[in-house]
Image (cartoon, helix red, strand yellow):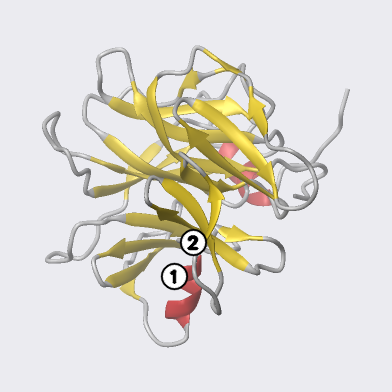
Amino acid sequence: MNVYCLPFTLLLLSACGGLSPLRGHAVVGRDAYLVFIADGPGGQSDLFGVRADGGPVFQVTYSSVPEAQPVLSPDGGMVAFLRGTSRDDRLPGRVWVLNLLSGAERELPLPRGSARPERLGWSGDGRSLYVQTGLAIYRVNPPPASPDPALVGGADRAVAESSLVVFLGEPPFGRVVACARSLCSQTDSGSPAPFAANAHDAVRWGPDSVGFLTGADLIVRPLGPGRPRRVEWSEPPAAPRQLSFFPGSVNGKR
């Protein structure tokens, strides 16, 4: 039996009780797993998950309204995402956080008059959630703290923007960008270069790999020597997209 230690924040969250949406599939904060958006049996977009080593895909949320843009916290204990207000809401515009240990959800409201949220990202320590709304970025506190949204500016703006990027390498030497129905690599000093043809929805898969979708196939490509591999997931739902990855941890270390 493997012995491991969850980070303190996860232990605090688990004290709230409840049932984990990942129960029976992955151990929150320890195993490596992927959370993504796909269309459920009724055609509604929900959050789904799968272990990094493949296997059965499982449903995480069962909302009656559309959801989008999931992002896992650095410790794997929470996932932030956008949720609509009605079944016909094609552009979900409210920020929610789901506790993957207890199943508890909370909406994180933005200031009145702010533009619709478009993308989300976590700070490296998991203490802040960044919300991009048009040209503005807000910093919001995740549970159990009060949200207290605040505009991000100055030197903090670059840190916030970096949370929204799929970086290549450690330390980063570039980033992945969409280009003509494919993916390209982009550095600060050069033009975009082809990275993966007929691919979409890239996600950082640790410091030395990138995951992406080719149709309904989940592919992981190493940045160094080696060939891309397909993650063998079973019964994937329709139209998987918008990936977020937690690399797992051992003894509380990633």
Quadrant position of residue 85: top left
Q: Nearer the viewer, residue 130 or 105?
A: 130
- For label 1, the residue is 161
Up-down: is 75 above or below 173?
A: above
Give 226 or 125, whichever is nearer the viewer: 226
Say which residue label 2 marks: 165
Left of 232 or right of it: where is 176?
A: left
Q: Circle 2: is it few (<14), some (14-19), or many (20+) Cα within 10 Å?
A: some
Above or below — where is 49 with respect to 93?
Answer: above
Q: Quarter holding the N terminus? A: top right
Q: Who's the residue at 22% across and 24% down the image? A: 64
Residue 4: horizontal and vertical position, in percent? Answer: 82, 37
In space, the residues marked 2 and 1 are separated at their CA atoms by 7 Å
Query: How many residues crowd mark 1 within 10 Å: few (<14), some (14–19), many (20+)?
Result: some
Residue lying farthest to the bottom in this orientation: 154
In the displayed structure image, the side of residue 229 where residue 174 appears, left or right: left
Q: Is residue 170 above or below residue 20?
A: below
Query: Which residue: 44% across, 70% down?
Result: 161
Residue placed at 59% from the left, 63% from the top?
Answer: 124
In the rendered structure, which amino acid carries the disc numbered 2? Val
Q: Is residue 36 visible?
A: yes
Mark 1 residue element: helix
Is there a contact, CB below 8 Å, between mark 2 and mark 1?
A: yes
- Residue at (13%, 33%) from the top-left corner? 86
Q: Taking 114 as reference, is 143 above or below it? A: above
Q: Which mark is residue 13?
A: none
Report whether 172 appears left or right of 113: right
Asked if residue 100 can be seen in this view, the reply is no
What amino acid is at disc 1?
Answer: Glu
